[in-house]
Image: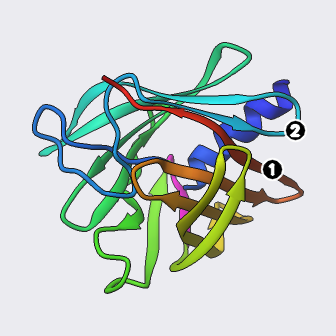
Amino acid sequence: MKRLAGLSVLAVLTLAITLPAQEGAATHPYYPLKTGSEWVYKVQGGPIKVKVAGPEKVGSANGFKLETSAGNKVSATETVAVTKDGVQRFNVNGLNPEQPILFLPTDPDATTSWQVNTKVSNQAITGTFKVNKEKVTVPAGAYDALHVRGENMTIGSTQTTVEYWFAKDVGIVKLRFTLGSQDATLELESYTPGK
């Protein structure tokens, strides 16, 4: 379970999750979040839960804090916000990248690829994201999804690949990543929207 918790932190660090209209926050149709929204993912070693803990201000943007739990213990946190460019990660486990990390563009038909080039705690994070449309089936069901793939990604000196599948009105339905010799796939088992 410890390895699983570590992998979930690495997944969050490498690049997962967006937010909706609440207290002035912008929305994204492929990530409609509200405080209390919860996703449960199937992964080897036991389920992983991601919950929107509440709103959180990030610079001039209105974002949300998300908590990732394994075994009912919070193992990672992040702050994301919807900006004019799309869904961006502003903070991971209390660490702020020099530039927020865009992981879902506002218009995936117009922005089909983009570069990431930032640093977190003096470690460079670089690579290219690409997005296309794809059908995906997970325990929670079958979805028409946006498939976002981070290619040729590096965190410090470690090679990584990260992939997200976003479903409209649900959010991330599948996440797969490789970080060095470690890899994991998370598939949505259930989604509960917040109130």
Q: Amino acid at mark 1?
A: Ala
The spot of residue 38 in percent (x, y) is 50, 29
* Residue at horizontal 59 percent and vertical 51 percent from the top: 173
* Quadrant housing the C terminus: top left
In the rendered image, the residue lying farthest to the front is 141
Question: What residue span does the magenta drawing correspond to?
Answer: 121-126
Q: Which residue is mark 1?
A: 184
Q: Are marks 2 and 1 in contact (CB under 8 Å)?
A: yes
Crowd class of label 2 (few under 14; some 14 to 19; many from 20; radius 10 Å): few
Pick the front one: 34 or 193: 193
Q: Answer with the quarter of the image where residue 39 lies.
A: top right
Vertical side of 126 occupied by 36: above or below: above
* Quadrant housing the N terminus: top right
Pick the front one: 99 or 164: 164
The spot of residue 192 in percent (x, y) is 48, 29
CA gap, disc 2 to disc 1? 8 Å
Q: Amino acid at mark 2?
A: Gln
* Residue at horizontal 73 percent and vertical 45 percent from the top: 139
Which of the marked residues, 2 or 1, is nearer the chain's N terminus?
A: 2
Please give the label number shown on residue 44: 2
The spot of residue 154 in percent (x, y) is 65, 67
Pick the front one: 97 or 189: 189
Vertical side of 125 occupied by 186: above or below: above
* Residue at horizontal 58 percent and vertical 47 percent from the top: 13
Secondary structure character of the magenta stretch overall? strand
Q: How many marks?
A: 2
